[in-house]
Amino acid sequence: MSIDYQFDKNHIWHPYTSLTQPLPTYAVTHATENKLYLDSGETLIDGMSSWWAAVHGYSHPKLNKAIEQQTQKMAHVMFGGITHQPAIDLCKKLVELTPAGLDKVFLADSGSVSVEVAIKMAIQYWQSQNHPEKSKLISLRNGYHGDTFAAMSVCDPVNGMHTLFNNVIQQHYFVESPTVSFYQDYDSDAIIEIESVLKQHSHEIAAIILEPIVQGAGGMKFYHPLYLKAVRDLADKYNVLLIADEIATGFGRTGKLFACEWAGISPDIICLGKALTGGYMTLAATLTTDKIANGICNGQAGVFMHGPTFMGNPLACAVANAAIELLFENDWQSQVKQIENWLNTYLSPLEKHTCVNNTRVLGAIGVVELNEAVPMAEIQAFFVSQGVWIRPFGKLIYLMPPYISQQEDIKTLANAIDVWLIQNHAQNCG
């Protein structure tokens, strides 16, 4: 059956894409391991893990089996007044694996919704403590936390993707993102601004929200673990909560199971998603402490005011259980370390191009930052012609490959970037 590209172009709205001047789309007919197979016949090495989620690649027998077996029992059942073993098993795993003290689990639909849940938890907690005035958040510039309304309100208000909505979303406090990179010597002055805001406004601040160690869609910035540790200390000092958005960084991507481990800290609330199901289904989780959960449930409402229709979906929970088991069966630490070494080997030489600002690598994340934004349609078509799937944004050509990727795959991905820099920027990238 042929792909109806014209219908897709005329009627289907793709993410961050115009319907009147849409970017080209490429039809995938099937995917296995770390390969995408196009309707036009090309086979592409996946460098994106389908927006960082498919850490085990595609069509994995263990994950397929988990869904097939669960389908024979039930695909979905409401979570209100009902429970089931896949959800119980998953929540046990999450309590065991996440940083200490995160013992209460709320299952949500998607990463953005898990952020909504986290913000609601923080605000409802302070209301239950008779501090309704604590309803603001502090967020970092260059941060990204999702596209729903509360999540948008804590994304960068100037350089982010949601400036159109600044007049209708709640206004929060923003501080500059950490200036000390992961590999630099730490400078304690990095927290001056955030402490200044806390000194003046802690009476109205419910929580600090940040992406630990790696700011993802806001610029793929890697910052120093001691900054994160200092923010944890400041949150305690000024009596505000700390929300860690680990949707992109969780489950090994940075070289630690959770990025908070780089700083040896536990947040008050953590958001998980993306790789949680190995990229198979949409599912997220928001975990918090006994203190926060008990505070909410002993408050005026007596319950936490949120309940998605597909909360705790059995199919999603079943495949998430299998995906987490697979992380350890595959020795994710060795996989990620290998990819980190290969990314360093093949991306670092790209700094020879004068249009490259820098390259940087952390865990299974590799970034080539250019001096100017790339022409999206052009570069996407070129990468497809080279047999790779890389989707840059702005000035960033980045790689977040599946953990099962091999050395030759990483070399091929990096070589495609090198060839594009040579062929398309010959004047500026000698």
Image (tube, rainbow, N blue to C red):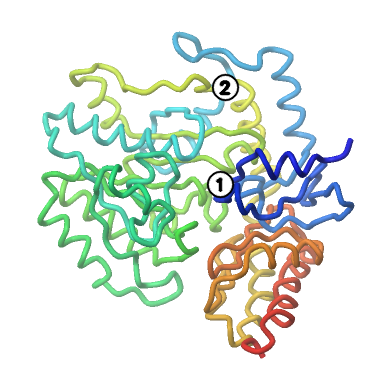
Question: Left or right: 273 with respect to 191?
Answer: right
Q: From the viewer's side, name the closer residue of 392 and 137.
A: 392
- Which numbered disc covers residue 251? 1
Mark 2 belongs to which amino acid?
A: Asn
What is the spatial separation of the Cα atoms under label 2 and label 1, in whole angstroms?
20 Å
- In depth, the one of 270 and 14 nearer the eye is 14
Q: Determine the secondary structure under disc 1.
A: loop
| Residue found 18% across the figure and 60% down from its top | 195
Question: Which quadrant of the figure contains the N terminus?
Answer: top right
* Left or right of 277 on screen, residue 273: left
In this figure, which residue is indicated by the disc labeled 2? Answer: 313
Q: Residue furthest top?
A: 81
Name the residue: 77% across, 65% down.
407
Relative to 369, does residue 94 appear above or below in the rendering?
Answer: above
Q: Count the numbered circles shown.
A: 2
Quarter where residue 136 is shown: top left
In the displayed structure, does residue 420 sit left or right of residue 203?
right
Between 4 and 173, the residue placed more toward the observer is 4
Mark on residue 384? Answer: none
Please name the amino acid that badge 1 sits on.
Phe
Which element carries disc 2, helix, strand or loop? loop
- For image coordinates 45% across by 8% down, the residue present is 81
